[in-house]
Amino acid sequence: MTPIAEGVSLAVLAAVLFGITTPSIKEAGTDAGPFATAMLLYAGAALATIPWSKSSARREAPMRRGHAGRLVAIALLGGVIAPACFAWGVQHTSGTSASLLLNFEAVFTVLLGWRLYGEGIAGRVIVAVFLMMLGGAVIVMTSTAASAGIGWGIVAVVLATLGWALDNALTRPLADLDPVQVVRWKGALGALLCVLISISLGEAFPKGSHVVALLICGAAGYGMSLRLYLLAQRKMGAGRTGSVFALAPFIGAAVAWMLGERANGFSTLGAGLLFGLAVYLHATEKHEHRHIHEHVEHEHAHRHDDGHHAHSHDPEIAGTHSHFHVHEERMHEHAHGPDVHHEHRHTSSS
């Protein structure tokens, strides 16, 4: 598999986990305030990292004190503001509409990846993003025409997608660190900030069964999903990962349909075909050109059989491991994505 194809597989899994939780959050959050709901989601995400701790610590680059500022910003945007907007918005629109409005996150993320990190956007990526936007627009317009009084719910969900897109862009430099630590700290900080705001606002807290449901949603859709998302970003950058992650809205809409929301009918099927074609375009993309690797010293998880890590150890180390290492300047050509070794900017759509 090419690096981009591997990234697509990881992003699809992340999208499935996130997408299936959206209708469940609508149901479980009916008796809770938006910040209380967000707190439980990110508490679940933090708790879900416990089983992975020991295995990841041996292979991954750890988070350091210099990452604290970025992590706080990520926790505020992605762990407080965005989920609170989403939790409120999903209660003021249909589960199908809320799910499919999440398409805007992909659009915002692709644009931010292009502008902030110079990630190349080739023709296939542009077409894939357009198809995803078209699929979401078709079904959201159908849902909006069939419902009344959902305007502010739509605005809140779109604001949530903007917050998560900014979160994705800020998270990109952390994607090559231990994803377990990133998820744990983001979840813990987000949950702490949300509970403080929730208490200060006197929000209602959900009943016992809904607490458990929201924790489970957080573990799957905001914990494991984020871990997979970070691994996908390693392979193909922020923009492409965000675009493939746009499968999540359709998955959420499909779950809502199975739970009884049948308003969209054939438009849901049509959107599904558009999403499927878009993912195919991503998975079959091949980004290859001659490029230069500048001299760099950094730390991240790597193997010695990936074509970029020829340094030796005494004794030799097999498999994935992490330590500070040096790359000398070199020029070569091969298929690649915008990962930690290929963050060069593109002056055209190459």
Image: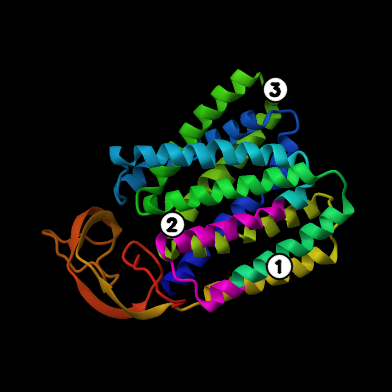
Residue sitting nearer the eye, 318 or 307 = 307
Instruction: Report, in whole angstroms, how far the alpha carbon at label 3 lies from the one at label 2.
Output: 36 Å
Decide whether residue 120 is among the magenta residues.
yes
Q: What residue sits right under mark 3 in the picture?
A: 204
Vertical position of residue 203 compared to residue 325: above or below: above
For residue 310, which quarter of the picture?
Answer: bottom left
- x then y, percent, for residue 242: 54, 59
For the point 56% across and 63% down, the residue is 243
Q: Which is nearer the N-term, disc 1 or disc 2?
A: 1
Residue sitting nearer the eye, 345 or 261 = 345
Residue found farthest to the left: 314
Kind of residue indicated by mark 2? Leu
- x then y, percent, for residue 186: 46, 39
Locate the N terminus and report the quarter of the image it occupies: bottom left
Q: Is residue 216 left or right of residue 152?
A: left
Q: Which residues are magenta?
A: 99-127
Does the image show residue 52? no
Does the image show residue 73? yes
Q: Main secondary structure of the magenta part?
A: helix
Query: Do the residues bearing badges 3 and 2 touch, measured as CB atoms within 8 Å?
Result: no
Query: Would you call the spot at circle 2 few (<14 residues within 10 Å), some (14-19), or many (20 or more)?
Result: many
Q: What residue sits right under mark 1 in the picture?
A: 134
In front: mark 3 or mark 2? 3
SS at mark 2 in the image: helix
Kind of residue indicated by mark 3? Ala
- x then y, percent, for residue 270: 77, 69
In front: mark 1 or mark 3? 1
- x then y, percent, for residue 309: 23, 66
Report the disc number at residue 231: 2
